Image: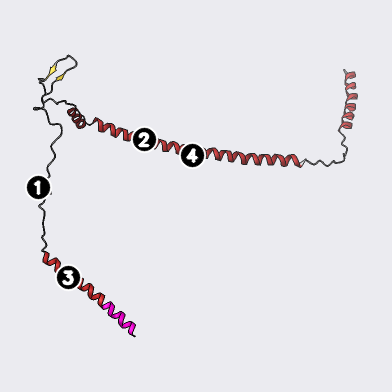
């Protein structure tokens, strides 16, 4: 065992010497390393142009979407107005008074005592009788009369012809007098 230890001791200095020789630093002359500027400038320029182009495309697409949304809102408003007008027209066509007048124009007569059929068992409720034009219910109501206080008696004022002639004569005289006074002032000014 001691022989092995001696061998190991002999080896350690050799390994240490080899490591020291490998670890020795030497001064190396400095070589100037300059990074190429052209690729950097090209990269920055490409990023800048790409960013501006991207922003321009994004802005254009946003404006196009805004125009489309405005057009669709206008179309929706027009369709809503059309739907409302069609609903109002439909309500006018479904008006019971209008339907009754149209039926009367076609020769139909409303019954004075209608009868009804119960659908569950088919039983007739009421006493049916044929309708005639003489005993029919009035379809269009009579016009309403205004109350007496809303129909005042008209007030009539008569003007005598002699009063109007005198007033017209005075008015023409006063106008003539003013015209004559203007003429006098003009003549006096021209004489001076």
Whether 58 is among the magenta residues is: no
Can you identify the residue that label 3 sits on? 169
- Res 41 quadrant in image: top right
Question: In front: mark 3 or mark 2?
Answer: 3
Image point 21% across, 32% down: which residue?
A: 98
Classify 10 Å Cα crowding around label 1: few (below 14), some (14-19), many (20 and above): few
Q: Nearer the viewer, residue 114 or 123?
A: 114
Can you identify the residue that label 4 sits on? 67
Whole-angstrom CA distance, mark 4 to mark 3, is: 74 Å
Whole-angstrom CA distance, mark 3 to mark 2, is: 68 Å
First of labels 3, 2 by sequence position = 2
Whole-angstrom CA distance, mark 1 to mark 2, is: 46 Å
Question: Which span of residues is magenta-colored?
Answer: 181-192
- Res 5 quadrant in image: top right
Classify 10 Å Cα crowding around label 4: few (below 14), some (14-19), many (20 and above): few
User: Residue 122 in the image: x percent, y percent?
Assistant: 16, 14
Can you identify the residue that label 1 sits on? 148
First of labels 4, 3 by sequence position = 4
Q: Nearer the viewer, residue 86 or 164?
A: 164
Labelled pair 3, 2 in contact (Cβ < 8 Å) = no
Classify 10 Å Cα crowding around label 2: few (below 14), some (14-19), many (20 and above): few
First of labels 1, 4 by sequence position = 4
First of labels 1, 2 by sequence position = 2
Classify 10 Å Cα crowding around label 3: few (below 14), some (14-19), many (20 and above): few
Whether 186 is among the magenta residues is: yes
Whole-angstrom CA distance, mark 1 to mark 3, is: 44 Å
* Extreme residue in the bottom direction: 192
Whole-angstrom CA distance, mark 4 to mark 2, is: 20 Å
């Amino acid at each position: 065992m001691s022989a092995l230890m001696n061998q190991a001791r002999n080896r350690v200095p050799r390994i240490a010497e080899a490591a020291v020789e490998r670890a020795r630093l030497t001064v190396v002359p400095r070589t100037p390393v300059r990074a190429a500027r052209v690729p950097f400038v090209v990269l920055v320029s490409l990023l800048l142009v790409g960013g501006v182009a991207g922003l321009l495309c994004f802005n254009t697409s946003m404006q196009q979407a805004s125009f489309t949304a405005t057009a669709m809102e206008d179309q929706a408003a027009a369709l809503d107005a059309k739907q409302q007008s069609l609903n109002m027209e439909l309500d006018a066509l479904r008006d019971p008074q209008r339907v009754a007048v149209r039926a009367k124009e076609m020769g139909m007569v409303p019954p004075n005592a209608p009868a009804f059929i119960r659908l569950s068992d088919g039983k007739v409720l009421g006493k049916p009788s044929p309708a005639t034009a003489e005993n029919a219910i009035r379809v269009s109501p009579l016009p309403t009369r205004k109350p007496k206080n809303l129909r005042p008696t008209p007030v009539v004022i008569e003007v005598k012809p002699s009063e109007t002639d005198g007033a017209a004569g005075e008015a023409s005289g006063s106008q003539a007098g003013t015209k004559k006074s203007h003429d006098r002032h003009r003549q006096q000014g021209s004489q001076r």
